[in-house]
């Protein structure tokens, strides 16, 4: 069988196409080399501009030593990443 024959049809074809289009738009704008939080923040902006509803950084249940709790994730902004990058260069890092 060919690879095309093995593919199942997409259930949410239009939605999938719009989300992938937003991902490609962010990648074309930013290029490669950034940390994941930078792309995450840019993708949030792009999805919002395109009117695509999404949930970013949902609370995830976390249990340590059998004590359930909720630990919110903390996003890292571009400014934080840029600051870290500049400090790394000052210390002689790449």
Image (spheres, grey):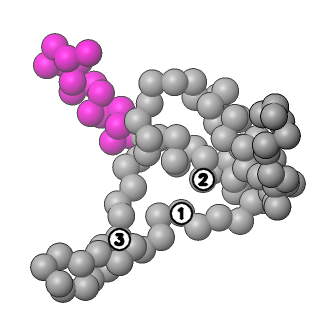
Q: Secondary structure at mark 2?
A: helix
Point 72% across, 43% down: residue: 20
Most common secondary structure along the magenta stretch = helix
The residue labelled by disc 2 is: 44
Residue 84 is one of the magenta-drawn residues: yes
How far apart marks 3 and 1 lie (CA) works out to 11 Å
Question: Can see residue 18?
Answer: no
Near-viewer residue (29 or 66): 66
Point 52% across, 48% down: residue: 41
Near-viewer residue (90 or 28): 28
Q: Is residue 93 left or right of residue 4?
A: left
Mark 1 or mark 2: name the one nearer the start of the chain: 2
Q: Is residue 39 left or right of residue 8?
A: left
What is the number of the mark on residue 92? Answer: none
How far apart marks 2 and 3 lie (CA) works out to 17 Å
The residue labelled by disc 1 is: 56
In the depicted structure, whether residue 88 falls above or below residue 3: above
Q: Secondary structure at mark 3?
A: loop
In the depicted structure, whether residue 73 falls above or below residue 49: below
Residue 61 in percent (x, y) is at: 35, 78
Report the span colored magenta: 79-94
In the depicted structure, whether residue 26 falls above or below residue 50: above
Point 73% across, 50% down: residue: 19
The residue labelled by disc 3 is: 72
The quadrant of the rendering that contains the N terminus is: top right
Q: Mark 1 near mark 2, Cβ–Cβ under 8 Å?
A: yes
Residue 34's quadrant in the figure?
Answer: top left
Near-viewer residue (20 or 56): 20
């Amino acid at each position: 069988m060919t690879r095309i024959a093995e593919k199942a049809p997409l259930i949410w074809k239009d939605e999938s196409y719009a989300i992938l289009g937003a991902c490609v738009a962010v990648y074309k704008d930013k290029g490669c080399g950034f940390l994941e939080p930078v792309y995450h923040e840019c993708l949030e902006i792009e999805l919002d501009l395109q009117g695509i509803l999404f949930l970013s950084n949902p609370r995830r249940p976390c249990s340590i030593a059998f004590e359930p709790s909720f630990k919110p994730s903390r996003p890292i902004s571009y400014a934080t990443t840029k600051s870290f990058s500049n400090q790394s260069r000052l210390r002689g890092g790449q």
